Amino acid sequence: MKRFFHLLIVFLLFALPGLSQNVYPSHWWVGMKSSALQLMIHQKEVSNKIPMYKLSPAGMKLAEGVTLKAVHRIENPNYIFLDLVIAPNAKPGKRIFSFGPAATAFKIGFELKARSNENGLSRVQGVTAKDFIYLMIPDRFANGDPSNDIIPEYRDKVNDRKNMFARHGGDFRGILNRLKYFNQLGVTTLWLTPVIENNMPQVNEWGNMIAGYHGYWFTDHYQIDKRLGGNEGYKEFCNELHKNGMKVIQDAVYNHVGNHHWFSLDPPSKDWFNTSQGDKGPNHREEVFYDPYASSFDRTQMLDGWFVPHLPDLNQRNPFVATFLIQHAIWTTEEYGIDGWRVDTYKYCEEKFLNDINTALSREFPRLTVFGESWVNTLTANAYFTQSNINAPFRHNAKGMLDFQNCFAMLAGMNEGFGWSNGVGKMYMTLAQDVLYKDPMNNCIFLDNHDMDRVFSVVDEDWKKLKMGMNWLFTLRGIPQLYYGTEVLMKNKKTNTDATVREDFPGGWPDDKEKENRFTNEGRSEKQNEAFNYVSALAGFRRNSSAITSGKMMQFIPKDGLYVYFRYDARQTVMVITNTGEKTAKPDWTIFAERTSAFNQARDIITGKTKSLKDIELEPKESFVFELVK
């Protein structure tokens, strides 16, 4: 009975007039490394409802363990910002922040929670070279709950699988229903394109009316899209993955929001968004950040340009914008326990802000991983945006990047004839420039993604070529990422739209034909099963290979299209050998004696068969991963 009355009192307090504001963050935690917290309150004329306070140098005690340090009023009276200090000894619980005389006080309800004691253990573990990342668009992967396909209060009420530009209904429940599939494939980490609410209408892009099914058009940072399962569904999703020994990467966008975001519809201030060039696009030239001859004009155009007109560009030079984004990233990491962030459009953001948010995240979550996404023109640019050995005026602190240059090199190795800087010659040259990175093992490597032509189509559906790429993907330095469906040979190229490379995974919907269900052996063709089993075998070997996940690498200059490199440590030596030439190749082992002299046999990690080194011979387009044995 006593507990009942306590709950009733709490309910009544939070039902008082003035407690219905939109408060961001919605709640926080005690025991954070940083004691500072800035609340944004969004409500009509809210700045006129909180009286001015003459704060003492020590601030004003708002509630138990919470001190008000400053009140910020800005141009738009619908917003007010409160700087709080959370005491180190503050206890978890709900608070009421009261402003003004008791009879007419303006009240804000806020809760401080206890932090998870599993951070760094079963959650917020970080993603390393021991992991295998599987990238998917959740709307396109599997539909486990048709009841959330259409949300009546959302602007876009279309769900139509026959329309490649519309939403199709995939969700968290559909993904969780396929955990067995991920275990069979050897996946350790799921990276979903953004899950934050995209309450946007369909938008005209390049002549097509497109839904925000991909997730990159945010409309409320603190809400997970209800069509995927909402906040509680995402919490269940992350918890279930962690219970099954898997990790979660969340996709972040700091650069922009959708034009129906609540602070786009009601901007807090004139400088909340970058407007120096209207809604015109950036120049997309990342060179402006490290070019010693760059102009301020070009740099400003890069930073202030809008990616597309319906995505207002956030001004991270505004300290309130920066704090909002930083606190949201910390809030999300603690709330859901994600293990890493992939940051979209990294090169379009303010550099100091990027370092600040990375520092804040690593302070609270030391094992958390951050990948920056920058589709860049050169390897120098790729290295510049991460911890590097480049002596530039600005030094970035991201631990890793999506390694586009490595991707382009592997595509060249699969598809181009051998040359000094072509084919595997490009792979050799690209990897030789790892000297630019502080630790290239932190980079995420891949063959394709949701913005690119599918790799199976890029290699003209040649399984031998794709095997080369898979061998490289799972044995080179870095963290491998596979785009959903590549393991069952999904194919297509972009034709005036990205939608053609973002098709539904066959078998993910209740009305899909069972004979075409790619989640099962029976639903896959013989070639698709071969591909699935090949990826699974590579992933399984990699997971238990100390040489690949934490060892060194040595490569040899390609000759006549024969490319050989080794991954090795004190316990294991792995040799990856590929013939991209036009003739049968028999290696000259005197060249590779530096790594092979202690061995005389090689075990094929796919078939398990062992053969003498002197008997190894490769036909054109053959590629093998061998573990060397004595």
Image (cartoon, rainbow, N blue to C red):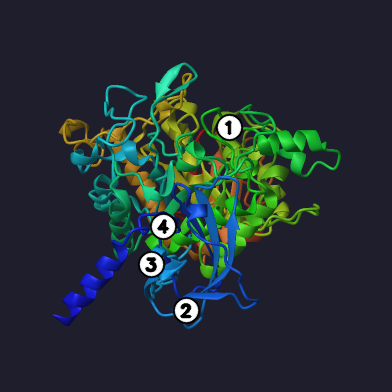
Across and down, in percent, residue 482 comes to 43, 44
Nearest-to-viewer mark from 4 and 2: 2
| Circle 2 residues within 10 Å: few <14, some 14–19, many ≥20 | some
As drawn, is 155 to the left or to the right of 426?
left
Given the image, on which type of amino acid does mark 3 rest? Ala
Between 416 and 175, the one nearer to me in the picture:
175
Question: CA gap, disc 4 to disc 3?
Answer: 69 Å
The quadrant holding residue 374 is: top right
Nearest-to-viewer mark from 1 and 3: 3
Q: Quick check: marks 2 and 3 in contact, CB under 8 Å?
A: no
Q: With respect to residue 461, does 577 lie above or below?
A: below
Seen from this angle, which residue lies furthest left? 1
Query: Which of disc 3 and disc 2 is earlier in sequence?
Result: 2
Question: CA gap, disc 2 to disc 1?
Answer: 43 Å
As drawn, is 522 to the left or to the right of 314?
left
Look at the numbered disc 2 and give the secondary structure of its residue. loop
Residue to which mark 3 is pinned: 103
Given the image, on which type of amino acid does mark 1 rest? Phe
Q: Quick check: marks 2 and 1 in contact, CB under 8 Å?
A: no
Q: Which mark is residue 307?
A: 1
